[in-house]
Image (cartoon, rainbow, N blue to C red):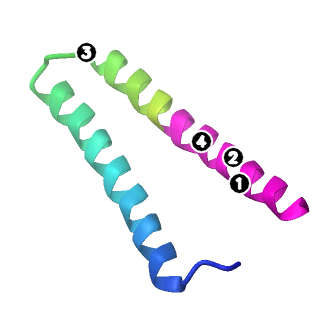
Amino acid sequence: MPMPRSKTLKTAAGVVVSFAGLAGAVIVLSQTESISVEMAKLMLVALVGLYVGFGVLIAVYRLIGKLD
């Protein structure tokens, strides 16, 4: 059953906003020198990895659901 387009867009917008918010928080922490520049880079790479990893997991879950 395909999702309605508006629900898909809301989900995509939510993911983008949450990623931007977390990345912005890391950048603000780096600018206020609460964390080092190297730590900020590591946190941003880890954040991208989490979003890509969970995206793959969700895609595989939906693909397996279509096999039944």
Alpha carbon separation for disc pair 3 and 1: 35 Å
Q: Please name the amino acid that badge 1 sits on.
A: Ala
Spot occupied by residue 61 in the image (x, y as percentages of width and height): 73, 50
Q: Earlier in the sequence, mark 3 or mark 1?
A: 3
Q: Residues within 10 Å of mark 1 (few under 14, many from 20)?
A: few
Alpha carbon separation for disc pair 3 and 2: 30 Å
Q: Quadrant of residue 34?
A: top left
Q: Is residue 54 left or right of residue 67?
A: left
> Viewer-proximal residue, 18 or 29?
18
Query: Badge 3 is on which residue?
Result: 36
Q: What residue is rendered at 69% in x and 46% in y? A: 56
Q: Please name the amino acid that badge 4 sits on.
A: Phe
Query: Badge 4 is on which residue?
Result: 54
Marks 3/2 in contact by CB < 8 Å: the verdict is no
Q: Within the magenta stretch, is there residue 15?
A: no
Q: Earlier in the sequence, mark 3 or mark 2?
A: 3
Marks 4/2 in contact by CB < 8 Å: the verdict is yes
Q: What residue is rendered at 56% in x and 34% in y? A: 49
Spot occupied by residue 18 in the image (x, y as percentages of width and height): 33, 50
Q: Could you say whether the residue bearing mark 2 is in a helix, strand or loop?
A: helix
Q: Which mark is residue 1?
A: none
Residue 40 versus residue 27 in the image, above or below: above
Q: Earlier in the sequence, mark 3 or mark 4?
A: 3
Q: Quadrant of residue 32?
A: top left
Q: Residues within 10 Å of mark 4 (few under 14, many from 20)?
A: few
Marks 4/1 in contact by CB < 8 Å: the verdict is no
Q: Main secondary structure of the magenta part?
A: helix
> Viewer-proximal residue, 32 or 11?
11
Q: Could you say whether the residue bearing mark 3 is in a helix, strand or loop?
A: loop
Marks 1/2 in contact by CB < 8 Å: the verdict is yes
Q: Please name the amino acid that badge 2 sits on.
A: Val
Q: Is residue 3 left or right of residue 48?
A: right
